[in-house]
Amino acid sequence: MKNKKKLYIETYGCQMNFSDSEIVTSIMLENNYEVTNDISGADVIFVNTCSIRDNAEQRVKGRLREFYTHKKRKPNLIIGVLGCMAERLKSRLLEEEKLVDLIVGPDSYRDLPKLMQTVIGGSRAINILLSTEETYADIKPVRIGTKGVSAFISIMRGCENFCSYCVVPYTRGKERSRNPETIIEEAHNLFEKGYREITLLGQNVNSYHWNENGWYFAKLLEKVATINPKLRLRFATSHPKDISDELLYTIAKYDNICKSIHLPVQSGSDRILKLMNRKYTRDWYLNRVNAIKKIIPECTISTDIISGFCSETESDHNDTLSLMEIVGYQYAFMFKYSERPNTIAAKKLKDDVPDKVKITRLQEIIVLQQKLSLKSNKNDVGKTFEVLIEGESKRSENHLSGRNSQNKIVVFPKENKKTGEYANVQIHKCTSATLLGEIVQNNE
Ligand code: SAH
Ligand code: SF4
Ligand code: F3S
């Protein structure tokens, strides 16, 4: 057997990036590499990067400095920057970060074997071409860092929404959907291998479409849901502008389509939403939330919020707080606005909210969200949920941890249950982050 070279891969950013790292790993394994978790023994270090906020980029730059210490010790070590920072900074990254050997954008991973040959030959290599077609549909991702219970399937790539603050349309290129047959086949295979939960991924999954035979997101979701009732389905992210009643009825119809929707709102103020180019109003958003509450009453809603966007006033900020109360989010990802070079906001709007104000407002949003999460969890005390077990609880080896359909973390005493099985758990107590309970009956 030929001696395999060792690849260490580190991933930042969104779930799409984690899914891409599985594609990269697959391509590298085909080319005589094996994965290692031990960075000091690696022949190649890849860092799959995120550009969404400045601090995401700074973290990666810090990590690159740490990688150099390994390179000093081992001059043949190859360091590659993949993903959104590669796409945003292009060859500037080679100039700024002198020890980077390889730069590969998100649509160029098929070119990795060739690029690696160039680097091994002694030159630096770069491919940052964006594609209008690439979906890696035929590449079987190598699942890394999973316990064999949950997996991601990318169903589309890119984004053309051009929210004014966002780099993604520039780093990921045009929106394109993946052939539905390859998605369904991948889901089948995962179920056969023992996986019990799949998350369909895209920057804007509800605009999925495939012309042949008229596929759209609700139809795809339904098709994957019918593979097996024991296979749970989640999806992220939905854009509020296209969350249709038909999609909501499909979610309601199948027990195994999870009753939790991630619906990023960003702001509760109409004026700010317009400046953000989000293409919906506060009323439109609340109308969609009402539709969810009516069609799927047990559904939880989570969101993303940005504090301190350009020109945001105290009254805009209060609109965000009041909207959060009305919706009663179960969970939120909350950020302060970070201006990204070359976005519409960077070109046309002034980043004029002082950092201190951004932080104060963010803190108010976080405190309110904790209160809303606790309220939502308290409401579940006494209820019984079917929980898919993901592993041992971090705090105690006598407890298991998993999620209910509503995407809430549930912790309970082990009894005879194992990772990957379902358990019916009655909730006795909660914190703002976790439901605590006990198994009430075996259902497997
Ligand atoms: N496609 C998804 C989200 C992608 S990015 C959607 O449209 O909902 C994830 C989140 O990062 C966004 O929802 C937004 O809240 C946040 N974000 C994006 N750009 C940002 C910026 N420049 N500053 C702060 N937060 C940002
Ligand atoms: Fe960015 Fe908007 Fe596209 Fe989401 S929808 S990735 S926030 S441009
Ligand atoms: Fe970051 Fe790129 Fe995802 S910028 S959030 S890794 S699409």
Image (spheres, rainbow, N blue to C red):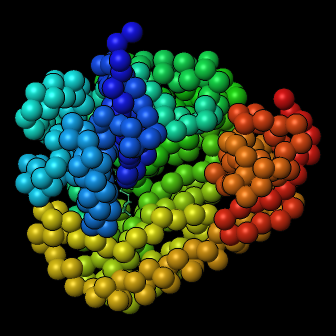
Residue 332: image location, x then y, percent: 52, 65
In this view, the residue farthest toward the front is: 73
Residue 126: image location, x then y, percent: 12, 38
Front in this rendered view, residue 13 or 123: 123
Picture quadrant where residue 344 is located: bottom left
In this view, the residue farthest toward the top is: 1
| 356 in relation to 114, above or below | below
Q: Residue at x 61, y 63 (%)?
A: 330
Front in this rendered view, residue 101 or 110: 101
408 lies left or right of 136: right
Q: Is residue 75 visible?
A: yes
Front in this rendered view, residue 417 or 348: 417
Residue 74: image location, x then y, percent: 26, 41
Residue 264: image location, x then y, percent: 44, 60
Q: Residue at x 15, y 25 (%)?
A: 117
Q: Residue at x 25, y 52 (%)?
A: 68
Picture quadrant where residue 16 is located: top left
189 lies left or right of 121: right
- Where, quadrant-wise, is the N terminus in this rendering? top left
